[in-house]
Image (cartoon, rainbow, N blue to C red):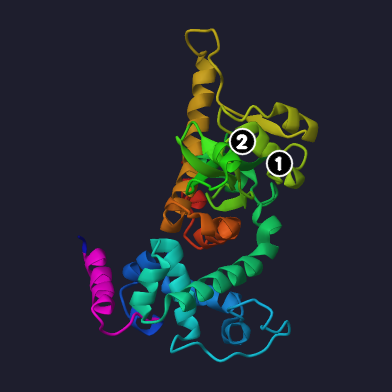
Amino acid sequence: MGPSGYVMGSIISQAEQGGRPISYEMVSKKPEKEFRRLTGLSKHNFLVVYKFVGGDNMFDQMKYQYNSRTPNRRKKQKRPDRLTHHDRLLLTLMRLRRGFSIEDLALLFHVSSALIGDIFYAVVNLLYHRFLPLRERMFTTRAAQPTSVLPACLKSFKNFRATIDNTEVKIQVPYNYKQQGNTYSKYKSANVVNYLVACNCWGAVSFISPGYEGSISDVELFRVSGICDLLHPDDVLLVDRGFTIEEQTDALRVKLVRPAFLGDRDVFSQEENLMNSKISAARIHIERCIRKLKCFHILKRMTNNMIPMLDQIVFVIACLVNFDPPNIQALQERDM
């Protein structure tokens, strides 16, 4: 166990043994690396997110249960137990990043599992609705990615708009027999929900679709994802071989850049080999982007009771990932 793991282990062990509960006050005093390991954010960006979602004023007005007895009007509510506003965001991020169960967090924060569950669902909902207005603005325009700022690996692709790929989230086998078949992916040999992901020239998430059943093809996923509504004529998309989506992109006058197919031939031409190499080098960054999403361990396997909020969770994580430094340092690579 490295130094970072040792520090985190000592914090958790102390709370589990009935000592001082975990709190934002405690964790914020730990090394930056350890704070990021627990939350997925730097200390500075944690406070940026806290302020972005509304800060103290918003957390004062939050409702944690929605039923016939909770008023529709916004009303300041009594703070539950001893948890501070920052604690509530902290525990939510810890569940997203580290995949802690509701029961584990209740043990660590010395509160009930019911309270942790209510807070987690409420804060994820808050994050989602605060980030949601940014969805279309996230899809970086071609004008914002001129050739002059493109990193070396993308210089060959004039009018570049995005690199796209699909990713999946494994889910518990659904109770419904039909859903079991619809969500089963032969490729992954598991029940999954599929998402279309796009990244811009700096490797940031620029688009993530709603989730679709695991049996969906790449072609159909592209068609129903909603990304077509955001594309413009002459945009260039980098895709993998599975995205045989010319019917959709031709109608939009969008150019598709995809590795060549060998077909019945024995070898690629010299030009095809060169282009395939360039595409592979550029596509590394969508793979890194997806790996960053999967560093949020809650996505390792979703239980059935979490499925209704899976799309919210995935979108929130995509936004949180974008607080990281760029995957591609365009200015450093520009003249390489």
Q: Nearer the viewer, residue 101 or 38?
A: 101
Up-down relation of residue 102 to residue 312 (above or below): below
Q: Is residue 309 visible?
A: yes
Q: Nearer the viewer, residue 206 or 314?
A: 314
Residue 225 percent coordinates (x, y):
68, 44
Identified at 47% across, 49% down, the residue is 172
Label of residue 216 in the image: 2
Up-down relation of residue 127 to residue 61 (above or below): above
Q: Could you tell me the amino acid type at mark 2?
A: Ile
Q: Is residue 44 magenta?
A: no
Q: Could you tell me the amino acid type at mark 1?
A: Val
Label of residue 224 in the image: 1
Most common SS among magenta residues: helix
Q: Which residues are magenta?
A: 3-23
Image quarter for residue 212? top right
Disc 1 crowd rating (10 Å Cα; few below 14, some 14-19, many 20+) is: few
Identified at 54% across, 41% down, the residue is 180
Q: Nearer the viewer, residue 150 or 327?
A: 327
Left or right of residue 148, residue 286 in this image:
left
Q: Is residue 5 magenta?
A: yes
Contact? badges 2 and 1 (CB < 8 Å) = yes
